[in-house]
Amino acid sequence: MTSAAPVRGRRWPVPPSLLVGLAPLVLFAAVSAWRARPSDDYPTLGQTVDSVVRSLVVPEGIAVVALAVVVSGLGWWRIATVDPTRTPLRWTMIAPLGILLVCLVRLPLIDWSALPVRYFLLLTVGVLFVGVFEELMTRGVLLVGLRRRVPEFAVWAVSCVLFGLLHLLNVLAGAGLGTTAVQVVFAASFGSTLYVTRRLTGSLVPAMLLHAFWDFGSIGFSATVRPGDTSLLVPAGIIGLFSFAVLAFGIVAGGVVAWRDDRPRRLRRRWRTVPPMAADAVRGDEPRLQAV
């Protein structure tokens, strides 16, 4: 009686790999650089219905579909969107809750009558696409690849830095160097809070929604504020200062969460060269045995 030969096929899901995790981010950066034009008027992004459709809904929608196909092909949906264990550091919840508070108090500053209803509906769709795509790419696929090779603290740091550096591409779309530098620092800090959000909830979905909510308020406010309107300077300034404080706290929270996760790794490394207690006991008994 002969046994059936094992069927050899493609391994699925694809094993986690740093190169595979970086691939979507590198491809996105290359495509964005190729599409960008120095003549683009970046400050007017999302200011009109046409701009929202052309700059957010259509390109981000295509990007979401393309990335979803890639993640499905890799078989990474669960590992990219779900953390098996949540961080027990509940005090870190201050970071995402602080950002949520900023998003809520910024809504009354938007002039809802300045633009038609379809603008805000399309903006909602556009920022949802942005939140899903950027989170799935940076705190999803990239996180999986990084976790294959580096400790969690490096996963947190590298994912935040790369998320911030992606915004350097805005220079190619017409943004000023000073504005872009601020965006890079802000995005990297915001990325830490979004990392904490994933680690607290065990899911990437809350981070996607928080990301989208932030972009909605930011774009909606800049699109409806009237030039020369000084009545919003004080509340906008207070919200801005509070936002920077929350983001700074988010950096600390993200670093602590990741550092705590690496504690078992550090302990294994520390005790790797320490001989077992049984070996010490045997060596301690040897002279007495010889003496007898």
Image: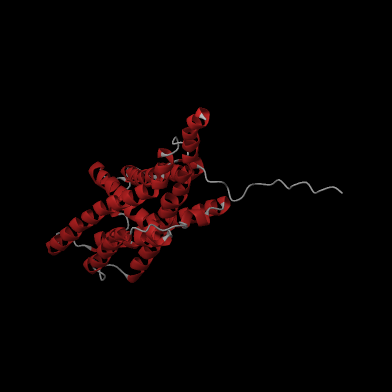
x and y, in percent, of residue 244 in the image: 22, 54
> Considering only vertical position in the picture, is 199 above or below 278?
below
| Residue 116 lies in quadrant | bottom left
The residue at the point 50 percent across, 36 percent down is: 282
Tell me, yes or no, if residue 41 can be seen here.
Answer: no
- Residue 271 as seen in the image, left or right of residue 242: right
> Considering only vertical position in the picture, is 151 above or below 139?
above
| Residue 273 lies in quadrant | top left
Residue placed farthest to the right in the image? 1
- Residue 213 as seen in the image, left or right of residue 265: left
> Considering only vertical position in the picture, is 49 above or below 192?
below
Question: 230 or 196: which is nearer to us?
Answer: 196
x and y, in percent, of residue 89 in the image: 33, 58
Question: 283 or 160: which is nearer to us?
Answer: 283
| Residue 115 lies in quadrant | bottom left
Rendered image coloring scheme: secondary structure
Tell me, yes or no, if residue 69 can be seen here.
Answer: yes
x and y, in percent, of residue 16 in the image: 53, 46
Question: 172 or 136: which is nearer to us?
Answer: 136
Question: 67 or 172: which is nearer to us?
Answer: 67
